Amino acid sequence: MDENKFLPKLSQNLLQILDDNEYYDITIEVGNDPYVKIFRAHMVILSHRSPYLRRLLTINANKTNDGNLTHIKLPNILPETFQIILR
């Protein structure tokens, strides 16, 4: 595949993964009551795209190999801001 077509397609696929409600392995609870939003994501993508989230996942997330979902809370970030960061 031509590289000029591959990279835009890859970017589009990654954005589609964000909107996919299947196969995610982490939920991220962002904001404070009453403005809380839960985001679904993929740890491997987050850890490779963000040094901050890599550290957070390494230090604070419950790492399990038994298929359990990992959940982290980021109460000091507005959901709208995190949406921009995630994309």
Image (cartoon, rainbow, N blue to C red):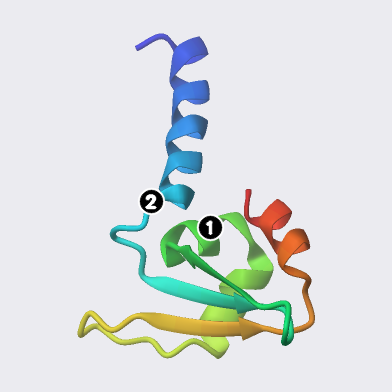
Query: 74 or 45, which lies in front?
Result: 74
Please rate how many residues cluster around mark 1, counting C-alpha atoms within 10 Å: few if below 14, some from 14 to 19, many from 20.
few
Q: Which residue, as the protein is rendered here, is positioned at the far front?
A: 34
x, y (%) of residue 18? 48, 51
Q: Quadrant of residue 49?
A: bottom right
| Label 2 to label 1: alpha-carbon separation | 19 Å
Furthest residue in direction left, as rendered:
66
Tell me which residue sits at (71%, 67%) in the image.
Answer: 79
Q: Secondary structure at mark 1?
A: helix
Q: Which quadrant is home to the N terminus?
A: top left
The x and y percentages for residue 22 are 30, 58
Q: How many marks?
A: 2
Q: Residue at x 45, y 24 (%)?
A: 9
Residue type beneath disc 2: Asp
Relative horizontal placement of residue 18, taking residue 51 as reference (left or right): left
Q: Is residue 6 left or right of residue 51?
A: left
Circle 2: is it few (<14), some (14-19), or many (20+) Cα within 10 Å?
few
Q: Which residue is mark 2?
A: 20
x and y, in percent, of residue 46 in the image: 53, 61
Q: Nearer the viewer, residue 34 or 78?
A: 34
25 or 52: nearer the viewer: 25
Q: Going 74% across and 85% down the picture, which residue do you hit?
A: 32
- Which residue has dot 1 on it? 48
- The residue depicted at 47 percent of the width and 65 percent of the height is 40
Task: List x then y, in percent, for residue 35.
Answer: 73, 77
| Proximity of marks 2 and 1: CB atoms separated by less than 8 Å | no
The kind of residue on which mark 1 rests is His
Q: Judge depth for marks 2 and 1 and give the one in front.
A: 2
N-terminal label among 2 and 1:
2
Residue 39 image label: none
Name the element at disc 2: loop
